[in-house]
Every structure is written in structure tokens, then in C-alpha cells.
Amino acid sequence: MTICFPMKKVGIIGGGFTGTMTAVQLIKQADLPVEIIIINEEGSLNRGVAYNPYSKEHLLNVVTGKMGAFADQPNHFLNWIMNRPDFSSSDENIVANAFMPRYLYGEYLEKLWQEALQMAISKDIKVQVINDKVTDIDKYESCITVYFKSKKTVTVDYCVIATGNQEPANVKIRNMSFYESSNYFKNPWLSDCVNNVKKIKSILIIGNGLTMVDTVLGLLENNYKGKIYSISPNGFNILPHRHNGLKYNKLVEELPDKASLLEVFSLVHKHIKKVRKFGVSAEAVIDSIRPYTQQIWKRFSIEEKKTFMARFRHLWGVARHRIPLHIHDKLQKLRIEGRLKIIAGKLLDIEEESGVVTVDYYNKKNGHKENLKVSRVINCSGPDSNIEKMDMNFLQNCFFKNIITQDELKLGILANTETFEIINNKGEQSKNLFTLGSNLRGELWESTAVNELRSQAGSLAAIIIKKISIDLTIGNGKTKIVTLIGG
């Protein structure tokens, strides 16, 4: 007897790591024919923003041996690298502990996608790619309607919001109209911000984090010879990777099952002092607690989380987000040469007249108000997470329609972290609307690295497939549609 099942439609809007790997996992785990629709706004399918850099100088911040796209195969990326002709004669241990270019990781993801397409053919899974932008969604009890910039719509039964990081928000200054200037670049991940710079004498970068580092490298690659200013409240505190592969277990051995914020930071401080006696810096201690941060964060009270955000967020970021040693050395050389000046301060105002941009700021080091003149301003202050204040974004529409709500810290979308089901403003858990990745940062804190995203993609794919399977068993024969929004 032949049993015919209705074709299930699986859509993905956005083609970054999270969306790509959720789709790959759906293909791998599906035991019935499905149709996958990829809706990709940026035009860089599979790569997203992170792995489609405008500069070949942009490197991964995690070593090759830890960047496998599958949770059960952490060496998958390493094996792929070693099978390339340009690495075949290299020492595998050296490569495993090296930092590969981001564009190369993008090629890896494209290769995974091509392999998934071949698997899809063998499993009668149809795949279609649509280049469009989501502008809004409407949610009903049994389906969701997705609206596109092209005015087309798709009605779906399951929808996954996997939008990844948003553009930075404009920093508050007195003259907010400056942000309409052609000499202001809000999105630091677009090549425009580092192009046509040969005749520019000076540039201001807002922010002193990892994106600032990438921007500086991009400017240098474009032969920029002028002076770069970089301002943030805490100045430059980026650390290099100095102890790759060093294991430290003593802190975890002392970590209580339900550690308070005070207990966690007391332990961290205690063990940093211990390792420094042996000439080892804090990275090994921080790395040892890294696998437990989601569990620790979920057990914190809301007051502890607020305290962390106010007092410890910067310190944790410095310890966690490090860069390759040779890149750190390059930045230090620029500072010694006077070509890169780091300012610990607060922006007060930015005015422009005849192409000259005057920046007023408060210098935290000397306690004085100062100013500088530049020709270009690039915003590297970090992704915006406050959905309520985002401009021209479908997430904001969803927020005001009470389809989604934010976590209490306004770091992302409120959701059940076990099932990825979104929770609305009434506390109701959706059965057909999901999210993962950076949108879960408020719930998990650590939810942006490949290590977390690959596991989430596999788990969510399994949940969706199980829901569809149950629905086919007890349903009325209607075709179900699954859509993933984002990358």
C-alpha cells in the first residue's frame, strides 16, 4: 500500500549561519518530502553579515578546531580546511589553533549548503531561493502570514524568527540631525564605510570593540593613511588570545549548582589571582566557565541580571571577546605611531559645516569637555537590541501588535529556551512562532557564537519536524508550511 503525504513547505528568510544551519538540519532530519523556501534579503546566502566581510583581513575570533558547524562534529571545519589544496601540507595542530579568515568560513558554509541541496534531491525535498525582505507578519491560531517588500505574501503554519544582529543604534547627541549626513556611516559592516578614504585626513569610530578592530583593518586595506580616533565610555580594553588550548578546571570544581552573581564573580576573581601567580592571564579562567554561562544566567534573579548589566557587562565582554595576537599587535603599533588614538569618553554633540565634522565629547581621563575635527564618522557601537525603538523593522511591527515581547533587559525576544517558542505580552507561549540565536540573548546571555547556534539549529529543526509529524498523524490533511525568518 502506498501512503501519500502532503508536501510540507519550509521557508527561511535570511541566509546567515543560524538560518542556513536550521535549514541544513531540517534537510538532514526530515523523514518525509518537504519544500524549503529560502527568502534572503541581503543577497549573501549562507554567509550573512558575519561571513561575507568586505575585507580579507577580517578573521574569526575562535580557532579553527572549534568552528565546526555541527555540534556532534566540532572538527568538521578543521577537516574541511585540511582537505583544501592550499592547506594540505600544513601542520594540522597549527591550523587547529589558528584563526581563519571569515570569508573562508563563508565558503565553508556555502559548501555545506551545496551538500545539503544534493541530500535534498535524494530525499525529494524541493528548495527554492527568493530574494526579498520581510516587512511584517500577522499571527493567527493555526497559521502566520508573512508580508514582503515586493508586496507578496506567504501564509505559513510555523514561523522561526532568526534575524541575527541588527544595525547599531544612533548614539544620543544634541544634534541628532547629523545622522542624516553623507559623512556618517551607521552600518559598519558595509564596505562603503571604508571606501574612498585616500583623501580623508581623519576619521572617528564610535565604539572600541571588535567591530572597531575590523573597521580599522578595512581602512588600512584601502590604503588609508590618515588618523583614526575611536571613542567609547571605557576606552580600549580588547585583549589578545594568549593561551589557546590551555585548560583550567579548578574554578568549575568550586562552582555551586545555584551560584549567585556575587559568588560567580568572587570565584572568578579568586582564580584569576591564582593563575596570575604562574604568569597566566585571565583568559583560561574565563574560558573554563564559558560552557556554564547559560545555566548560570538563567538562574540569576532579574535584579542580579540588572546589576551585571550595569557593573560587570563591560568586564565580561573584555574577558570574553578577544582577538588574534598579531592583530592586537598591529593595533598597538598604530597607537604607538599616533595613527590610532583611543578616547575613553562620552559623545556630547556632532556638528558639520562645509564637510568638516566637529565632535564634542567628555574626556573621562581628564574630566574636561573637548572636541576634535574629522571628515567621517563610523558607528561601531554594537548591534541594537531594543526592538521598541528600531526603525523600519518588521520586529517592531510584531512588538506593537503584541505578537512578540522583549525580555526585561531589552536584549532580545522573550521565549521558552527549551522549545524556542515565543512568548507574547500576555505570557502566552506560541505553538507556531519560534526564535533562536541572538534574539535569545536576554534569556541565555551567551547566544551568538557558533558553539551555541549550531546546537540550537539542530534542536529547533528536531522540534519542528516532530510537530509536523504529529500534525500529519492527527491532522486533517492540510499542507503545513514552516518559515524561518533571519540568518
Image (tube, grey):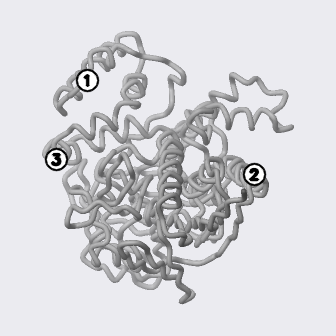
Looking at the image, tell me whether mark 1 or mark 3 is earlier in sequence order.
1
Q: Residue at x 53, y 72 (%)?
A: 478
Quick check: can you spot residue 70? Answer: yes
Quick check: can you spot residue 223? Answer: no
The local secondary structure at tag 2 comes to: helix
10 Å crowding of disc 1: few (<14), some (14-19), many (20+)? few
10 Å crowding of disc 2: few (<14), some (14-19), many (20+)? some
Quadrant hosting residue 255: top left
Labelled disc at residue 153? none
Looking at the image, tell me whether mark 2 or mark 1 is earlier in sequence order.
2
Quadrant hosting residue 222: bottom right
- Circle 3 residue: 302
**Structural distance between the alpha carbons of marks 1 and 3:** 23 Å
Q: What amino acid type should be assigned to the residue bearing mark 1?
A: His
Quadrant hosting residue 142: bottom left
- Circle 2 residue: 119
- Circle 1 residue: 269
Residue at the extreme front: 1
Q: Please tell me how many numbered marks the rendered image carries.
A: 3
Assign the C terminus to one quadrant of the image. bottom right
The local secondary structure at tag 1 comes to: helix
